[in-house]
């Protein structure tokens, strides 16, 4: 495997060094190995990647290695595992591990996660990360969100929460299941607020707003209004509400009797299952003012629809393509405005098509009403479409790489 990883011309001189930095004990290990052929540095190793490793048997640590832009995720996973086993770790088969691109919030919780497929190129993905990870997406200081992007390697068995729904005790004590996470524990516990506005004893604007506020103050950003309407309030900070554990819970075909709090995943789940049951098209309309969270909601819905489609298995190419299309579309149609650093300046009509067995087969995106005037003029403190800045960033990087 590693022979493919490195051309013979480079193999002879290569010496790989990894740094396992224990995040818990703050100890740093260095392991060097030369000429073995198995710990080779890849060709064109211009890119430094750091992998957070969270596996049984060793403390959480980081493995750092130089790699090429064209090295695939599966090759890198093997390489990191090899480095770990060189330092005494008893590794399992490579299928027992997952390599993901994750986003940590300001308290170190994973707030977004995407499992990489073998066709992904981590070095290229890293180029898309915000440059200054302490103030992502922009140089603004008004954003309260602090995100850190990283690659993470976990054991599938411990990290994959696809196992979780089948635990028999899960259904009887959901809050205890999340005991280790104070936010999720609270989210899945009972409280005094009303989760469905239709159940309010008195239905007036003040009572609705009071209930929404009380729930929001407790981190419950979703409230339903009947079975098919969801009110979502943008928290402008990430809650760990979208991780695989939660994805796996909001699947009614797996847990038909589970009573779950309102969530954007529940909307996707209802649409999916109603489509399958009645064989009729379903539609989700997302509306709100600029910056209210429509784009994020769209991502969460698409993410959940594809998760439902592949039922806990590794997503296929179609699912990956659907999810990967968003950053490209946003590059050409989103821009920083006074209200939103990633404001969609066009309307989107997204259609996801399914086969009779419930698997996604294709998707179609129609755009309308693109704000074309932004290309030539922007209001004060606003920007042009992201793509222009990406191109400039890319050209700068190439020049500095060649000059070094
Ligand atoms: N559920 C959420 N949790 C945490 N942060 C969120 C959530 N939804 C939105 N945000 C934050 O709010 C910002 C604005 O959200 P988003 O871009 O989805 O708004 P929008 O309604 O699509 O705006 P526009 O109409 O301008 O395109 C996001 O970049 C994100 O930082």
Image: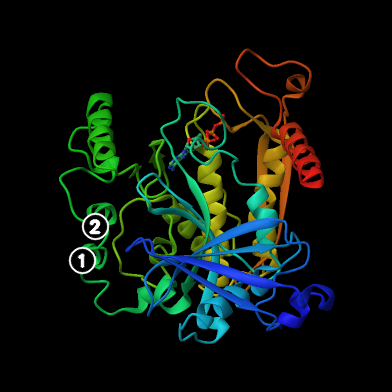
Q: Position of residue 400 (x, y in %)?
A: 76, 41
- Coloring scheme used: rainbow
- Decide: few, some or many residues near mark 2? Use Cα within 10 Å; few <14, some 14-19, many ≥20: some
Residue found 57% across the figure and 31% down from its top:
138
Residue found 42% across the figure and 71% down from its top:
159
- The label shown at residue 176 is 1
Q: Position of residue 190 (x, y in %)?
A: 18, 54
* In the image: residue 350, left or right of residue 198: right
Total label count? 2
- Decide: few, some or many residues near mark 1? Use Cα within 10 Å; few <14, some 14-19, many ≥20: some
**Element under label 1?**
helix
Quadrant in which residue 394 is drawn: top right
Looking at the image, residue 13 lies above or below residue 85: above
Q: Which residue lies under the disc numbered 2? A: 185
* In the image: residue 376, left or right of residue 115: right
Q: Position of residue 186 (x, y in %)?
A: 22, 53
Query: Is residue 251 shown to the viewer in this render?
Result: no
Quadrant in which residue 259 is drawn: bottom left
Looking at the image, residue 102 lies above or below residue 160: above
Residue placed most toward the observer, 140 or 209: 140
Residue found 52% across the figure and 43% down from its top:
296
User: Where's the N terminus, which quadrant?
Assistant: bottom right
Q: Are marks 1 and 2 in contact (CB under 8 Å)?
A: yes
Residue found 73% across the figure and 52% down from its top:
364
């Amino acid at each position: 495997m590693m022979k493919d990883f490195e051309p013979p011309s480079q193999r002879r001189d290569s010496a790989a060094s990894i740094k396992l930095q224990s995040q818990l004990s703050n100890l740093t290990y260095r392991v060097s190995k030369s000429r073995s052929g198995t710990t080779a540095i890849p060709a064109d190793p211009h890119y430094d990647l750091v992998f957070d490793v969270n596996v049984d048997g060793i403390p959480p640590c980081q493995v750092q290695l130089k790699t090429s832009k064209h090295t695939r995720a599966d090759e890198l996973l093997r390489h990191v595992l090899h480095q770990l086993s060189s330092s005494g770790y008893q590794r399992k088969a490579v299928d027992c591990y997952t390599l993901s691109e994750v986003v940590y919030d300001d308290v170190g919780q994973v707030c977004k996660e995407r499992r990489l497929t073998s066709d992904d190129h981590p070095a290229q993905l890293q180029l898309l990360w915000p440059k200054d990870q302490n103030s992502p997406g922009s140089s603004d200081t008004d954003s309260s969100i602090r995100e850190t992007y990283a690659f993470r390697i976990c054991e599938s068995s411990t990290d994959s929460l696809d196992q979780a729904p089948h635990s028999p005790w899960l259904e009887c004590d959901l809050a205890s299941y999340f005991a280790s996470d104070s936010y999720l524990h609270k989210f899945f516990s009972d409280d005094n607020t009303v989760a469905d506005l239709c159940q309010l004893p008195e239905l007036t604007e003040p009572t609705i707003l009071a209930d929404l506020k009380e729930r929001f103050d407790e981190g419950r950003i979703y409230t339903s209004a009947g079975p098919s309407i969801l009110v979502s309030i943008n928290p402008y900070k990430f809650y760990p509400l979208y991780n695989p554990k939660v994805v796996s819970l909001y699947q009614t075909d797996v847990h038909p009797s589970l009573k779950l709090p309102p969530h954007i995943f529940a909307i996707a789940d209802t649409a999916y299952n109603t489509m399958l049951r009645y064989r009729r098209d379903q539609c989700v309309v997302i509306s709100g003012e600029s910056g209210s969270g429509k784009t994020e909601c769209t991502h969460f819905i698409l993410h959940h629809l594809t998760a439902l489609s592949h039922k806990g298995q590794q997503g296929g190419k179609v699912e990956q393509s659907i999810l990967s299309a968003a950053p490209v579309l946003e590059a050409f149609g989103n821009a920083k405005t006074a209200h939103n650093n990633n404001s969609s300046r066009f309307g989107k009509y997204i259609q996801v098509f399914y086969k009779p067995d419930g698997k996604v087969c294709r998707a179609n995106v129609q755009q309308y009403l693109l704000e074309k005037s932004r290309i030539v003029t922007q209001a004060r403190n606003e920007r042009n479409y992201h793509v222009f800045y990406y191109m400039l960033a890319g050209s700068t990087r190439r020049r500095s790489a060649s000059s070094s």
